[in-house]
Image: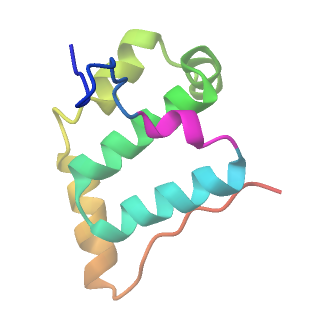
Amino acid sequence: MNLDESGRKLRPFDAARYLDTREAQAEYLTAALETGDPAFVGTALATLARARGMHATTKGANVTTQALHENLSGSDESRLSMLLEIVTALDLRLKAEPKA
């Protein structure tokens, strides 16, 4: 249990609680993409899935909850890593925008 100096219980910070607009979510993902770190991008996508709701995300992606967790766990970043390296080699950057 995490406590502050006065003994009050602290809740862990979760960015998903504050990503409540499509614009904020797009900015968050763009910032993650700009790091070029596949593990961080995976973590950001997992945070966005929580912000939108896991059920809605699995339904929209047409995958099971287990498949979504496995793909966002960061255990296999090789494809994302390669994609980010190619984008860098092309002197480009990826950017997320809300769909119209």
Which of the 4 image quarters holds residue 34? bottom left
In percent of width and height, residue 89 lies at 25, 83
Quadrant in which the C terminus is drawn: bottom right
Q: Colour mode?
A: rainbow
Instruction: Answer above or below: position of 48 versus 37.
Output: above
Which of the two residues, 85 or 49, is positioned nearer the viewer here? 49
Q: Residue at x 43, y 41 (%)?
A: 45
Q: Residue at x 51, y 27 (%)?
A: 50
Instruction: Answer above or below: position of 69 versus 65.
Output: below
Which of the 4 image quarters holds residue 5? top left
Instruction: Answer above or below: position of 23 versus 45.
Output: below
Residue 68 belongs to magenta span? no
Which of the 4 image quarters holds residue 33? bottom left
Quadrant in which the N terminus is drawn: top left
Which of the two residues, 14 or 91, is positioned nearer the viewer here? 14
Q: As drawn, which residue projects farthest toward the front?
A: 6
Q: Residue at x 48, y 64 (%)?
A: 30
Q: As drawn, which residue projects farthest toward the bottom?
A: 91
In percent of width and height, residue 53 lies at 60, 22
Q: Which residues are magenta?
A: 14-20
Which of the two residues, 15 or 34, is positioned nearer the viewer here? 15
In percent of width and height, residue 3 lies at 24, 22
Q: Residue at x 57, y 32 (%)?
A: 51
Instruction: Answer above or below: position of 10 versus 30.
Output: above
Q: As drawn, which residue projects farthest toward the right?
A: 100
Q: How many marks?
A: 0
